[in-house]
Image: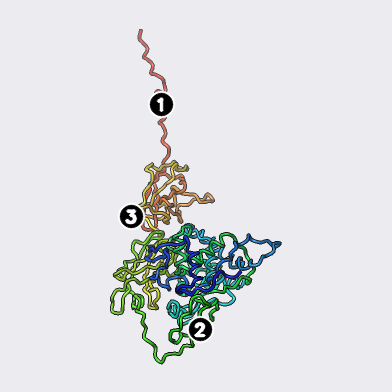
Amino acid sequence: MAAEFGRLRKGAVNTTVAAVVVAALAASQAPGVTTDDAGRKVTTGTQPSADTPAEDSATGNSPYYTDLPPLNSPSPSPTTSTPVTPGASEAGIPATVLDAYKKAATALQEAKPGCNLEWQLLAAIGKVESGQARGGRVDANGTTITRILGPQLNGNGFANISDTDNGAYDGDASYDRAVGPMQFIPSTWEWAGRDGNADGKKDPNNVYDAALAAGHYLCRFGWDLSTRSDLSSAILSYNNSQDYLNLVLKWLEYYRKGTHAIPDGTGTLPADRSDDNAGASPSPSPTPPRTPTTPSTPAKPGGNGGSTSPKPTPPTTTPPSTTPPTPTDTVDHLEDAGTAKLTAMAGDTFTEKVSARAETEAGKAVAKVRIRFTIVGRTDATFTGGEKYAAVVTNSAGEAVAPALKAGEDTGEFVVRATVVGRSIPGLDYTATVTERAADTLTRTSDTALTCTPGGEFADQVEVKATYKGAVADKVAATATLIKSADDPTENDKGPYFKDADGKTVRTLTGLTTDANGLLKLPKLYADDTTGTFLLRVNTAGGATLTVELKVAAAETSPTPTPSESTSGSASPSPTA
């Protein structure tokens, strides 16, 4: 069926239809303005935050489709024998697109269960952003048949975002455009992109990649989307518009009531767009910057776009800009703000944090600028929260401090890169190093003497505890060797020994690892026929060493009694007559 209302121009003032619709949608949906942990102003009130930079949203606050859900709730999924009623294609979701949403939601349930992302939210955003990939015009791999591009974000009615990708994603080397079924701008896709179909690529034009990226984007900052405030914050971070929030919530509620899969390519094409462009598909080819023109006559409210403005005449000279520069515009470069050496053991949190300062050409600090920190290189290290990126606003001293880094199990070096959101200036790289897990102290958990008779087995197994600077040293690699002497750590060729899986004698054990409590229990020890005192040495990564004494001796026996000692008593001398 047709949408319930026509076009809403982004930033438009009052039209009677728009006022009625927005009022209806906003009822009981009015969140306030708060600031999240990263310093982002999150709109939860009746108006979105004007301070949130467009380039820091998923879409750059690009136009979106304003078609509303049908008045009637969707029917349950039809079977092959169920006739498809009129409007079913509008209520349904193309099969491949629906599959992408559900797979992305399943992946997020495993990766970030606390986010509580529903696939219906991805479907709602996909509907508003691209009309479910233009009605499901995708190939068998989920890639759109033709690219879906938003208009140039050249400041002419939209945000002004100069090219950040040399046209790699959007084919435009002058300005950025929103790309793909989930409409990511290139600068956001660069860090938010995901490989959702395991083909080794992160393609914003692929619905599986885009849906997974959108899921991770909505689940950042530890948001719990089962709560109204976090849900609103996440949606507004995708496109910072109250009308957008209300519209996505409307589609979310619609899809929650049930929907069904329809064949790819048969979905209803969206008709109405928020920039009053009647859903026209922008050209995928690069577009040069527009020649400045004289302002056109505003459209009259209440009509279908108002009267047509006369054809503008290019001025002979470019008029001076009346828009004052933003703090971001004044940033010339980034400086290190005293970041200490970044080193951590595998599995640990780095004690030092990355800190950068935004400065003008004259070296003056610039406040209220968003700095993005991105982890680069082959590493499983993340920022607190499990993300590979973090965006932080500079303080009054122009400084932004990234969240703490958490080392994974991969050892070696990686890079944390700081860049200014919205500015194409060189980034600042910081090298971080992850070392292997280590222990500096080893102790036995028991002081029982370890003894054995020749050819027997030791009753007690050796157990040690590893610590590092007083804390439990878990998952630390260790070796255990029966050595010749305290001065000769080579493997002994006699005395106590371990057994391998085949029962063969082994006197050196490698590949040992302490458990979560820093404990390591060695296998049972056996003795050959050699008696004496022997040494077992345990070493760990980090240099911790413990030497344990083992004794092999014959069992003590009681002395054999003499005949006289075995008599119960001595005989009394015979008396003389």
- Mark toward the start of the polypeptide (2 vs 3): 2
Q: Nearer the viewer, residue 27 or 416?
A: 27
Q: Mark 1: which amino acid?
A: Thr
Task: Identify the mark at residue 11; answer none if there is no mark.
Answer: none
Residues under labels 2 and 3: Cα distance? 75 Å
Q: Image check: 370 left or right of 200?
A: left
**Which residue is farthest bottom?**
316
Q: Position of residue 412 (x, y in %)?
A: 41, 66
Q: Position of residue 89 (x, y in %)?
A: 63, 68
Q: Inspect this view and state whether residue 506 appears.
A: yes
What residue lies at 39% left-to-right and 47% top-to-bottom?
A: 534
Task: Indicate which label's residue lies in the foreground, 1 or 3.
Answer: 3
**Please, what is the three-letter code of the amino acid marked with disc 2?**
Thr
Q: Residues within 10 Å of mark 3 (few under 14, many from 20)?
A: few
Sequence-wise, the earlier of marks 1 and 3 is: 3
Residue assigned mark 2: 308
What is the quadrant of the N terminus in the image? bottom right
Position above or below: 174 against 204:
below
The tally of labels here is 3
In the rendered image, the vertical position of residue 473 relative to residue 447, given as above or below:
below
In x, y percent, where is residue 456?
Answer: 47, 42
Mark number displayed over residue 469? 3
Question: Residue at 56% across / 60% down in the picture?
Answer: 256
